[in-house]
Image (cartoon, helix red, strand yellow):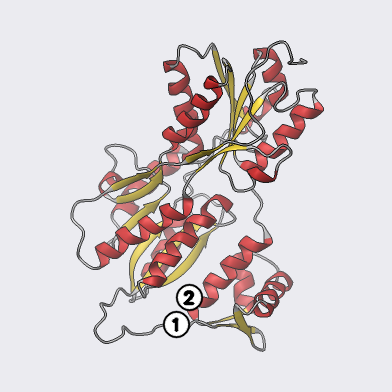
Amino acid sequence: MRETGADRRQRVLAVVEARGEVRVTDLAAELEVSVITARRDVEDLARAGRLRRGHGVARSLVPVRQAPVPGERDTGVVALVVPERHAYLNEVVHGARAALEEAGTRIVLHPAPQVAGADRPIVERALAGDDVRGLLIAPRWRTVDAEAADDGWLAGVDVPVVLLERRPRRGSALHARDSVCTDHWFGMHLAVTHLVALGHRRLVLAARDDSPTARALRAAFAEICAARPEVEDATTVLSAPDAGADPAAAEGPSLAGVVRERGASGVVMHGDVDALMLVRQLAEAGIAVPRDCSVVAYDDVVAALGSPPLTAVAPAKAEVGRLAAGLLLERLGAEAGPARQIAVLPELKVRGSTRSFDRVERKY
């Protein structure tokens, strides 16, 4: 999903507030945008009263604390490492930031580029600073092999670590670390149960296959559908040509083709933007939503803006960030006991893209 200007400006503001003052050229290099774009974002934020502009620099309106206030515990600096241009995690980041700032803890954002193995050198550089005392991280883990490769070194980091929106593999070294993640099995359960209750018996999941969330959703869909005797057929396809870790998998049939071939009347779509585009593709193929096919999106960032507004599973992303920050603060305060794995339940927002299945009215 392409990063919006608002999301990018939030990253600019986070970096500036974390450091107090940043050169615009440094902002552009760190966020991997042009200097013109970075300067425009700084100007927009200054006009909105969010920061101050200087000659070639951006200055925070929030003082950067260099030392603890007398009587307060010193929690130092928390490094936050997340994939760059990953819109799903923006709300998670904001939730974590709010909780840490409320506790008086400085947070430094480190966006990780879309390159295999990028997380490790970023974490090592971040932890080289004497004041970094904790790490919040959402590794990209595009493949299962990438997750396995990160297991040893990340579990061995010598500061408290909390994984964001990542569930460690059972028995892995990271299994003994704290993590906070959306319960994606439950989210898929909500979507499938909703469609089945409306009379849909032949379902399709259109999902990515290049992230831990996507893999969790695919596994949950297969398991839940197999356990529901009402479901006559369940098929999974890629949500976009570039949505898979294996390029060869992109050569499969279109979603509209699969819906027609399988006689599907209910579709779950991973990712709001992909969902909006796929609804349009269905319409172009003569399959109207929801008359011919009901659609449930998974994410709920922009699902409500669709035509029709999309029914969607809505993960509590800000709450994931807040809880992860709270776990880390407990570790920094030496208050935490055994490692904890927290699962946050998403909600289902019912809108206009789902309806009771009517075999007579369906046109294809």
Quarter assignment of residue 169: top left
Task: Identify the residue shown where x is 43% and y is 48%.
Answer: 165
Is 30 or 199 nearer to us in this picture?
Answer: 199
Looking at the rendering, in which quadrant would you find the C terminus?
A: top right
Q: Give residue 119's position: percent from left, percent from top.
A: 45, 56
Q: Are marks 1 and 2 in contact (CB under 8 Å)?
A: yes
Question: Going by the image, does 34 lie left or right of 144?
Answer: right
> What number of labels is visible?
2
Q: Which residue is denoted by mark 1 in the rendering? A: 64
Relative to 342, is 59 above or below?
below
Q: Give residue 362's position: percent from left, percent from top.
A: 73, 16
Q: Which residue is denoted by mark 2 in the rendering? A: 18
**Going from the N terminus, do you reach mark 1 or mark 2 first?**
2
Is 119 or 80 nearer to us in this picture?
Answer: 80
Quick one: SS at disc 1?
loop
Q: Residues within 10 Å of mark 2 (few under 14, many from 20)?
A: some
Disc 2 marks a residue whose amino acid type is: Ala
Mark 1 to mark 2: distance in Å? 7 Å
Q: Residues within 10 Å of mark 1 (few under 14, many from 20)?
A: some
Disc 1 marks a residue whose amino acid type is: Val
Q: Give residue 271's position: percent from left, percent from top.
A: 60, 40
Question: Going by the image, does 122 lie left or right of 48?
Answer: left
Is 131 or 328 nearer to us in this picture?
Answer: 328
Residue 30 appearing in the image = no
Relative to 293, is 123 above or below?
below
Is 252 or 359 nearer to us in this picture?
Answer: 359
Question: Going by the image, does 95 lie left or right of 273?
Answer: left
Quarter assignment of residue 337: bottom left
